[in-house]
Image: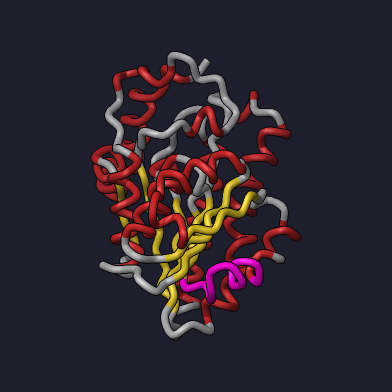
């Protein structure tokens, strides 16, 4: 599926899944406005894009800064033309502690980045998307939104909020040309802990968990978005728990607790 002659906005474009989504879109001929809070990471993405970098416009921006986000659409249009798609990838996890031990500062930060951030982008770009002959909207959720991970209860709650926000938008957009895709990744080989400002030394090897390569996740996301799929689950762990959760939420919860409880202090 080609994204040629399409312009996308991708959050978290400076590393991990967001970077791989950006590079895959560029490979397929699309133009990409890459958003990230870290300017240096965006420069690295541009360097990795090689000859495709001429269609990449970096924007160093904090997605929780509502005023900055609302002011962004005309800047992107000036750099790359009218926007055809928005893919909300950026997100952070919480410290691996129980809610009882989670500081309010950490609570506010996770809610702001994971929920308010995507909502800010949607409010800023949806009016323009509705005016396009066809358009794409995608939100990255998480396996943790339907299978509770011990020590990531708030993170999972923000992603569950993204789920319902997305499904509600799909209903509201039913008579429009804007498609809505929700992505549910499992364990992906990114440095989300470090990017979230957490010291997770040693936790990466806990249980020798199998992870999906970020590049493979990026390809799967772009395939789903351009293919106008409603939902896509990425990773054997996410798929197994997806089906198990529909069969028995308690069974899914018990399984993930037994496999992840070693991350709790």
Expressed as whole percent of the image width and height from the top left, the position of residue 245 reads 32, 45
User: Where does the N terminus fall, quadrant-wise?
Assistant: bottom left
Image height check: is 18 above or below 174?
above
Residue 205 position (above or below residue 210): above
Spot occupied by residue 184 in the image (x, y as percentages of width and height): 37, 49
| Residue 52 falls in image quadrant | bottom left
**Magenta: main secondary structure:** helix
Q: Position of residue 124 (x, y in %)?
A: 64, 68
- Start-end of magenta stretch: 74-84
Residue at the spot 35% in from the left edge and 64% down from the top edge: 225
Scheme by which the image is coloured: secondary structure
Q: Nearer the viewer, residue 206 or 244?
A: 206
- Horizontal side of residue 103 vs 3, given as left or right: right
Question: In this rendering, does residue 117 appear at all?
Answer: yes
In the foreground, 129 or 113? 129
114 or 158, which is in the foreground? 114
Left or right relative to 237: residue 39: right
Q: Position of residue 32 (x, y in %)?
A: 47, 61
Instruction: Farthest residue to the front: give it.
Output: 51
Q: Is residue 1 above or below residue 65?
A: below
At 54% across and 44% down in the image, what residue appears? 43
Q: Is residue 230 visible?
A: no
* Magenta residue check for 56: no
Tell me the residue at 57%/57% (across/down).
Answer: 118
Q: Residue at x 53, y 76 (%)?
A: 82
Near-viewer residue (164 or 195)? 195
The quadrant in which residue 128 appears is bottom right
User: Is 74 above or below relative to 96?
Assistant: below
Q: How many callouts does the rendering have? A: 0
Q: Which residue lies most toward the right here?
A: 67
């Amino acid at each position: 599926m080609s994204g040629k002659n399409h312009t996308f906005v991708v959050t978290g474009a400076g590393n991990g899944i967001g970077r791989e989504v950006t590079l895959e879109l560029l490979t397929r001929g699309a133009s990409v406005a890459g958003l990230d809070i870290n300017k240096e990471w965006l420069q690295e993405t541009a360097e990795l894009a090689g000859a495709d970098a001429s269609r990449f416009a970096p924007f160093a921006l904090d997605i929780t800064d509502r005023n900055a986000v609302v002011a962004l659409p005309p800047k992107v249009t000036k750099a790359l033309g009218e926007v055809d798609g928005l893919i909300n990838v950026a997100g952070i996890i919480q410290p691996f502690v129980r809610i009882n031990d989670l500081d309010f500062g950490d609570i506010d930060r996770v809610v702001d980045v994971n929920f308010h951030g995507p909502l800010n982008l949607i409010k800023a770009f949806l009016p323009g998307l509705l005016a396009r002959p066809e358009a794409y909207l995608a939100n990255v959720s998480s396996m943790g939104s339907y299978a509770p991970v011990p020590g990531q209860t708030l993170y999972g709650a923000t992603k569950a909020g993204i789920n319902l926000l997305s499904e509600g938008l799909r209903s509201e957009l039913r008579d429009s040309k804007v498609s809505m895709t929700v992505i549910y990744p499992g364990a992906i080989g990114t440095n989300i802990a470090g990017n979230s400002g957490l010291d997770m030394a040693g936790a990466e090897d806990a249980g020798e968990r199998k992870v999906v390569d970020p590049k493979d996740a990026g390809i799967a996301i772009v395939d789903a978005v351009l293919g106008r799929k409603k939902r896509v689950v990425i990773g054997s762990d996410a798929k197994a728990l997806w089906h198990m959760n529909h069969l028995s939420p308690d069974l899914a919860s018990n399984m993930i607790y037994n496999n992840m409880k070693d991350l709790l202090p």
